[in-house]
Amino acid sequence: MAIIECVPNISEGRRSDVVARCVAACRVAGVTVLDHSSDASHHRSVITLVGDAPGLRQAVLALYDAALAEIDLRGHSGEHPRLGAVDVVPFIPIAGVDMAACVALARDVGAAVAERTGVPVFLYEEAASSPARRNLEDIRRGEFEGLAAKMAKAEWAPDFGPAVPHASAGATVIGARMPLIAYNVNLATDRLDVAKKIAAAIRFSSGGYRFVKAMGVRLDDRHLAQVSMNLTNYEKTPVFRVFDTVKREAARYGVSVLESEIVGLVPANALFSVAAHYLQLEGFSPDQVLENKLRATPSE
Amino acid sequence: MAIIECVPNISEGRRSDVVARCVAACRVAGVTVLDHSSDASHHRSVITLVGDAPGLRQAVLALYDAALAEIDLRGHSGEHPRLGAVDVVPFIPIAGVDMAACVALARDVGAAVAERTGVPVFLYEEAASSPARRNLEDIRRGEFEGLAAKMAKAEWAPDFGPAVPHASAGATVIGARMPLIAYNVNLATDRLDVAKKIAAAIRFSSGGYRFVKAMGVRLDDRHLAQVSMNLTNYEKTPVFRVFDTVKREAARYGVSVLESEIVGLVPANALFSVAAHYLQLEGFSPDQVLENKLRATPSE
């Protein structure tokens, strides 16, 4: 059975009744609402859904209906940049489904949203129609207030829907990406400079691994330095390779790794690949995991 | 949500209609039939169920009803030793449940089986009422044919039910144990003597780890030697410790580990503990695995 995560961000973080109606719209067969949280200063809410493709398609379309009925960006002001009433909707492969299926789902939902609501749709990340549209920040630059001027340029024609913004709902960004893993390695030293040098060695922006963002920080209460990371594609830059590289770089300064930690949620497959690597497992498939076989077997 | 595995063994491996009715009896709400297989020469079938405690209790009681109606051990003959029509029923903790809960379930089901069917019940492994009853082989010694004489001795009074065998169904053995992991390490050599020495070093019977059974074998088609193991409690003797020890022992003979392999199914927690060990994960909990959180959240 396919497990896809979907994390819609809506531009409403203050009226709890509106958020509740948006969340309620997502509760359809085949979809579980794992979490939702609102930030009043950002004036934004994040809803975490998990389900299969047909269920998520239905949930997301219902969410657009609910959000567009009550959110008007012409009177909206918050700290977080936003382009639309439903600002961004990523589909994320977790288990039993690949990125191609999530890209197809993003395109399918994008076309349906534009047709149903008249809101222009931009596809991003893995679903982007061109490299210039991969990054959410590039699409969102100018925000709702600058959207009409931006879309007047040929290179910012939407992927689906009209070439002008929706009056109250702006535009919306839909796409597919890998799950993000928040991963930290704590060093057996309080030397911030060592953590910063290791972070620079492993992060993409300064020549390191393609799917690593990293910085060095000091945990003052524990008197130790930490390499704090986001791993943005655990299939292509796996956790074990990042850990081993941090350890090797630390050794160069005579520093040991004290421990590492995963902050928040992690897909099971990211940990199975760690086990398979260190055990040198040959021919291992996640289908051998009893819980996966259980999920793949129709219950009575 | 608790996931418990239950693997009833019944003394019928030839009449497929009887087996089908026994399997059908196990299909109740909250229980999934993962697999079932029959062996005609053993005259025995193994059914693999997964579910929660109330569901498995109901399924197993229904299985006893179905099996006792059609299986008569007085005319039964096969290669596999057996004591009863329903010969042995282990409950196995997989996720979200501990051994104590499986022991409690085994005792509860054992009492219910004896009261409902009049079949005497012996508890085994973790549910055993004394060390002499931990091993299935000790309870089963003498088989159905020797059961009346065996039970006439005070030390073989059953844990539940009458002190004499059921006329057609004999007795039954119910208990709780950890899942078994079939795990092999392939060596980068064809020297069988090295595999045998490593097996002797790590198995319980010759002084090794408490929950390891091991032997050395040669894979003639691949020209390599293998340490072939059963790991009978991955919580107390974890996979990573066994792997590292095999590797270290092999190095003593100048031999490298080529690869390892898991044969058949493995609980996710056994692999999570491998990942947590090598990554030196601090404060990791299986609750952080997205799929586990999904399972713990009521679906809509």
Image: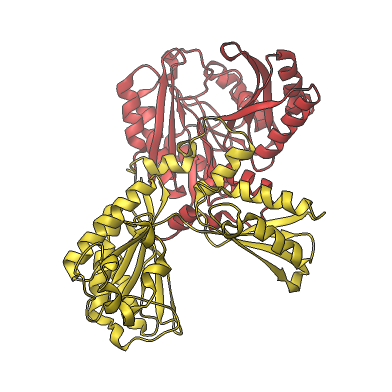
Chain colours: A red, B yellow
Pick whichever, B214 or B17, lies toward us: B214
Q: Pinpoint residue B7: horizontal percent, then vertical percent.
A: 39, 64
Note whether residue A1 is visible. no
Q: In the displayed structure, would residue B158 be above or below residue A98? A: below
Residue at the (60%, 19%) spot, across then down: A149
Q: Pinpoint residue A162: horizontal percent, then vertical percent.
A: 53, 33
Q: Pinpoint residue B34: horizontal percent, then vertical percent.
A: 42, 63
Single out the residue that lies furthest toward the front: B154
Residue at the (34%, 57%) spot, across then down: B128
Q: Pinpoint residue B2: horizontal percent, then vertical percent.
A: 36, 47
Q: In the displayed structure, would residue A16 be above or below residue A118? A: above
Residue at the (21%, 70%) spot, across then down: B163
Residue at the (38%, 46%) spot, across then down: B98
Q: In the displayed structure, would residue A190 be above or below residue A31? A: above
Task: Quadrant for residue B292, please give it.
Answer: top left
Task: Quadrant for residue B186, please give it.
Answer: bottom right
Note whether residue A16 is visible. yes
Pick whichever, A284 or B280, lies toward us: B280
Pick whichever, B181 or A16, lies toward us: B181
Picture mark count: 0
